[in-house]
Amino acid sequence: MAQPTADQPTALKPATESMTLLVAAVIVHDLEARRVVLLRRGPKAKFAQGMWDLPVGKSEPGEPITETAVRELKEETGLLVEPEALRLVHVIHGARGVEAPNGFLTVVFAAHRWSGDLTNAEPDKHSEVAWVSTDAVPAEFVPTTATALHDYLSNGPSVSLDSWDS
């Protein structure tokens, strides 16, 4: 076998046994009306049933995180956002999660431009999809994404940690 050169790096196998789950969330922020899009997780959700959340979902293998954000937003809300309209606003690093025993990284984007009509495109997963005033964000909110949303709205920290031992 030939030795790899600088222009031919050795191919690395995917770390399928210990991967950190990669997730994208989108804060659709109507600046003029001072409101954001939120979802209420339904009774059949894998976790946090009945709690509010941002549009959020897992990255597919080989999918850039911006495409994950665009895809998940459309799948959940019917709203369309161009990848170049996304602005990185927060990163959540969790040590573990319901579907992520090896940890998760959630990249949170904000979008101020979108098209389409807000709809509950996944009624089997969400009991409600709504525009919510930025002054009235519900308290019953998934803690990790609540932190990201509140930090974004207050121009606060852009990184948060979850479930790490201090």
Image (cartoon, grey):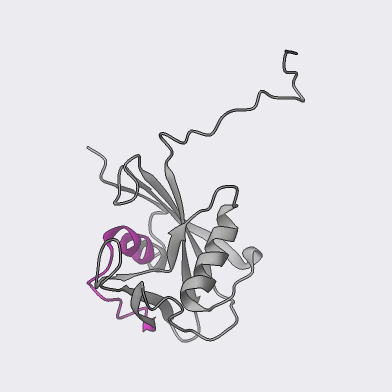
Q: Is 71 covered by the magenta stretch?
A: no
Looking at the picture, tell me which residue is in the foreground, 134 or 131. Answer: 131
Residue for point 40% across, 34% down: 18
Image quarter in which the C terminus is found: top left
Q: Position of residue 107 (x, y in %)?
A: 47, 54
Kindly indicate the quadrant of the structure image that contains residue 4: top right
Q: What is the tally of numbered marks visible in this picture? A: 0
Residue for point 30% across, 61% down: 46
Judged left or right of residue 29, residue 103 is: left
Q: Is residue 95 placed above or below 51 in the rendered structure?
A: above
Judged left or right of residue 77, residue 127 is: left
In the image, the segment drawn in magenta is 131-150
Residue 166 visible from this viewpoint: no
Kindly indicate the quadrant of the structure image that contains residue 96: top left
Residue 115 visible from this viewpoint: yes
Q: Position of residue 14 (x, y in %)?
A: 53, 34
Residue for point 34% across, 50% down: 99
Image quarter in which the N terminus is found: top right
Q: Position of residue 94 (x, y in %)?
A: 33, 46
Q: Position of residue 48 (x, y in %)?
A: 25, 64
Judged left or right of residue 140, residue 81 is: right
